[in-house]
Amino acid sequence: MAKEKEVKTNAMRILEQNKISYQVLTYECDEFIEGTKVADLVGLSYRNVFKTLVALGKSGQYYVFVIPVDQELDLKKAAKAVGEKSVTMLPLKDLTNVTGYIRGGCTAIGMKKQFVTVIHKSCETIDMITVSGGKPGCQVQLSVKDYIKASRGKTADITADLSTEISN
């Protein structure tokens, strides 16, 4: 019987080096899939699955923002959380060069450089968080406490106020 090989990503290696336990969740992925669809594919609530966004501050510094998949980043709140006058989303064409990851596989753990990372404060109300595992088709689920430690993140209110309630 052939043994199925699990290809470890940089994020997984870092979690293991830090003795952080995690679970790998996989799904079929031939092209970029929106975060809400990923949550549906792995069978988790939108409030537990977070997406990783990268922004550029007015100062020229890069920042990482991690928010629930069904939310939108509020650029003014994000700028305030990192002490910048303003931030803009990193152009997609620059993502791999800056982070080492590709769209759909970007995670705050194991980027080329350690950037200031801010995680939406709603993570404080859940036990487990699910984020990209470092490649499309792969998510990792771990405790919020361990994720904050591994990403060297802090929490803040960084999402736009959406008028609709989270339904999933």
Image (cartoon, rainbow, N blue to C red):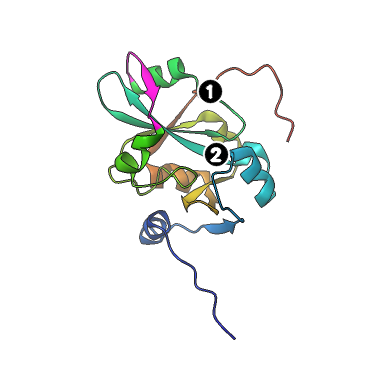
Amino acid type at image mark 1: Thr
Q: Label 2: which residue?
A: 50
The dominant secondary structure in magenta is loop
- Find residue 19 and report its horizontal and vertical position in percent: 41, 60
| Residue 52 falls left or right of residue 101 | right
Residue at the image position 50 percent from the left and 73 percent from the top: 5
Quarter of the image for the C terminus: give it. top right
Marks 2 and 1 sit apart, C-alpha to C-alpha, by: 12 Å
Which image quarter holds the N terminus?
bottom right
Q: Residue at x 52, y 44 (%)?
A: 144
Q: Amino acid at mark 2?
A: Phe
Quadrant in the picture for residue 75: top left
Q: Is residue 116 magenta-colored?
A: no
In depth, the one of 99 and 29 nearer the eye is 29
Label 2 residue SS:
strand
N-terminal of the pair, mark 2 or mark 1, is: 2
Q: Which residues are magenta?
A: 83-91
Q: Which residue is mark 1?
A: 159
**Left or right of 16, for residue 67:** right
In this view, 18 is above or below 54? below
Asked if residue 91 is positioned above or below residue 76 in the image, the reply reads below
Most extreme residue toward the bottom, as rendered?
A: 1
**C-beta proximity under 8 Å, tags 2 and 1:** no
